[in-house]
Amino acid sequence: NSHMVRSELMELYGLPEERLHLVRNVVDVERFRPREKSDVPTVVFPGGGVARKGLRVAVEAMRRVPDAELVVMGHVPRMLQAWAKSTYPRVQFLGQVPDPERVMGAAHALILPTMYDPSSNAVLEAMACAVPAVTTLHDGAAELLPHRWMAISDPLDADRCAEVLVAVMNEATLGETCRTIASQYTMDEGFTQLLNVMASGEAG
């Protein structure tokens, strides 16, 4: 589902390039769509697997972003919640959210300083909501971002993460550009590509 993963498969398993077909993740663009923004500058973190996804770095980065709130979805251990609140009081933990599109749609940016992700669904979902995403070059979804600078090279670099976060929140038309890109990866398009690969007899 990304060039990054395809390259890893070729390197680690010696698979020939012609046997590997790129089929991107898809997003429901009707469900994940632009919504009215929160009155307060808000950054959303997708949660779940927070150690790998870089919640600590996200919290540290938010300390460098003035007057913004961090909203965290998904399960987060209580001890980590306590640390986050003591480090950055303007953080909310929502737990499991049945309608993440509502939370994402109201945000001004998504932050995901992940150590590794083949291709984050959350990045594509945020983009479909016209919400710019800040992730890392260790996330295959970074290939979908409109600008390479939106993905940081070092997942532990909170300073750079904050710098990029401020930049994307100040780009007035960036959300619309993200929405346009995400709209290319509809469920129908993804399933059609997958079926074409299966029908060709080259899969597996």
Image (cartoon, grey):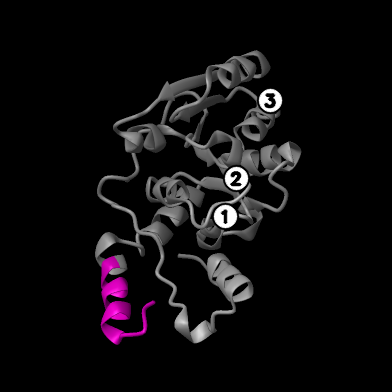
Amino acid type of the residue that numbered disc 2 sits on in the rendered structure: Thr
Give the mark nearer the N terminus: 3 vs 2. Answer: 3
User: Which amino acid type corresponds to the residue marked 3 in the rendered image?
Assistant: Arg
At 50% from the left and 46% from the top, the residue drawn is 132
As drawn, is 147 to the left or to the right of 158?
left
Q: Position of residue 32 (x, y in %)?
A: 32, 45
Looking at this rendering, what residue extends furthest in the front direction? Answer: 13
- Indicate whether 20 appears above or below 80: below
Q: Classify 131 as above or below 191.
A: above
Q: Which residue is mark 3?
A: 63
User: Which segment is the magenta one?
Assistant: 191-204
Alpha-carbon span between mark 1 and mark 3: 23 Å
Q: Give SS at disc 3.
A: loop
Q: Amino acid at mark 1?
A: Asp
- Which residue is under mark 1? 139
Q: Residue 50 location, x and y as percent?
A: 55, 34
